[in-house]
Amino acid sequence: MLSKITKKPNLWRRTLIFLTLLGPGIITGSVDNDAGGITTYSVAGASYGYSLLWTLIPAFIVLLIIQEMNARMGIVTGKGLADLIRENAGVKVTFFIFLGLLVADISNTMTEFAGVAGSTEVFNISKNISVPLAAIAVWLLVVKGTYRVAEKIFLIFSVALLSYIVSALMGKPNWSEIGTSMVHPKMALNFNYISMVIGLIGTTIAPWMQFYMQSAVIEKGLKVEDYKYTIIDVVVGCVATIVVAFFIIVACGSTLFVNGHGTQITTAKDAALALKPFAGAMASQVFAFGLFVASIFSATILPVATAFYVCEAFGFEAGIEKKWREAPQFYWLYTVILVISAGIILIPNAPLIEITLWSQRINGILLPVVLICMMLLVNNKEVMGNHTNKFINNVIGWITIVILVVLSLILVLLSIF
């Protein structure tokens, strides 16, 4: 009886500790479902129905492995990935890597504001109103808020992405077909199918996510003793990411593919509008709401991550917890990225699809470089001490990176040719 009584406080204590440390993993995983990701999942569901759901299993494994390494490096070293790359690769190499990342992230942020524009147009709100208001809102959140306040809002955004479950259920999915597609997938060896598989797995991980994950761990002040709770946070974040992706594919597969005979869509906004005749206006609006939340979420996180790792790489103060006078370079860079990204989207007839394609190409080129740097750092005893990768981690890690490198190169080549 005594043992039962003493176990309960320990359980409550552990639960409270986990809730206190909750954040970096879930937020990073959720941001992965940005406007580009939602578009990719929508196209997969509309074009192939449930037949590509199996790709979410390897996508989950890839995301989990990479995010765990990021969290461990941040906790053990107390330094961001950019700082570690500069210290171990030198300033010149760091400069060229981060110049490319900066260009890619500005393009990616434009894509998020394009998502804001597209989602609000479903509700008959002009982008000339929604985009400036969104840019001002996210600027105020970061510049005037604190990390704790921002993190709470980010977690609410993460939960709001589950609205895609509602949208999917309104489409009345065929669960037996879904189960069959997951267990016995029907694969095709043609150009379009293979490129779609590459896109689905490739959209799971982006270079800037690795920098944000590590910086979030540092901003939260997590220590080695917090590692086991942080891993739970990472796992929950990865599961949430895959669940959202699953229901987006199901929503479009149950409606656009079944009724529209492989409806052709190019953006997430197209998917939201196309749902209306098949699943009703409510399903269309819920889908658009999810796109809006995801776009605002990523439009906040992505510039923060970019400003953080660029400033960190070159020795400037950075972080939401700091005041403008303490980290002027961080806040100015964050502001400039927002202004450029939102401003270009407001240009009439801006080539949004071309911007998205080019951001994917640059991401594809830089991703292998960032991941190789990560693997070298996480196995460096001078950096990680006794917390380097175990043998099995290295085997899985390098196999994952080789696969991602190949997929990224193929994705870049497909985008170009």
Image (cartoon, rainbow, N blue to C red):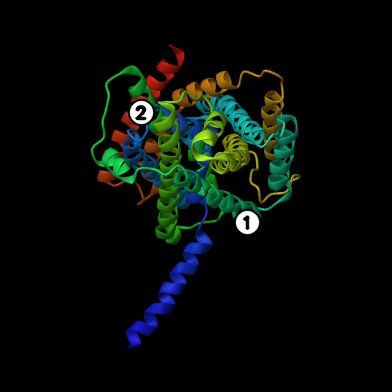
Q: Which quarter of the rendering shows the N terminus?
A: bottom left
Query: Residue flagged by tag 1: what amino acid is it?
Result: Arg
Residue that appears at 37% across and 78% down: 7
As measured in the structure, the alpha-carbon distance from the residue carrying label 2 to the one carrying label 1 is 37 Å
Which is nearer the N-term, disc 2 or disc 1?
1
The residue mark sitting in front, 2 or 1, is: 2
Front-most of residues 125 and 131 = 125
Q: Residues within 10 Å of mark 1 (few under 14, many from 20)?
A: some
Q: Is residue 69 left or right of residue 339?
A: left
Residue 333: which quarter of the image?
top right
Question: Can you give x and y, in whole percent of width and height, for residue 391 in the image?
Answer: 25, 44
Question: Can you give x and y, in whole percent of width and height, for residue 162 in the image?
Answer: 50, 49
Name the residue tied to disc 1: 148
Name the residue tied to disc 2: 197
Residue that appears at 60% across and 55% down: 152
Front-most of residues 255 and 227 = 255
Residue that appears at 75% across and 34% down: 129
Considering only vertical position in the picture, is 214 above or below 311? below
Residue that appears at 61% across and 39% down: 292
Q: Is residue 342 left or right of residue 7?
A: right
Considering only vertical position in the picture, is 416 above or below 153? above
Q: Which quarter of the rendering shows the C terminus?
A: top left
Question: Can you give x and y, in whole percent of width and height, for residue 12 in the image?
Answer: 45, 73
Question: Can you give x and y, in whole percent of width and height, for residue 4 in the image?
Answer: 34, 83
Query: Residue flagged by tag 2: what amino acid is it?
Result: Val
Q: Tell which residue pokes out farthest to the top in this image.
A: 417
Q: Secondary structure at mark 1?
A: helix
Q: Do the CB atoms of the residues marked 2 and 1 lie less than 8 Å apart?
A: no
Q: Residues within 10 Å of mark 2 (few under 14, many from 20)?
A: some
The answer to whether residue 330 of the structure is visible from this angle is: yes
Front-most of residues 363 and 371 = 363
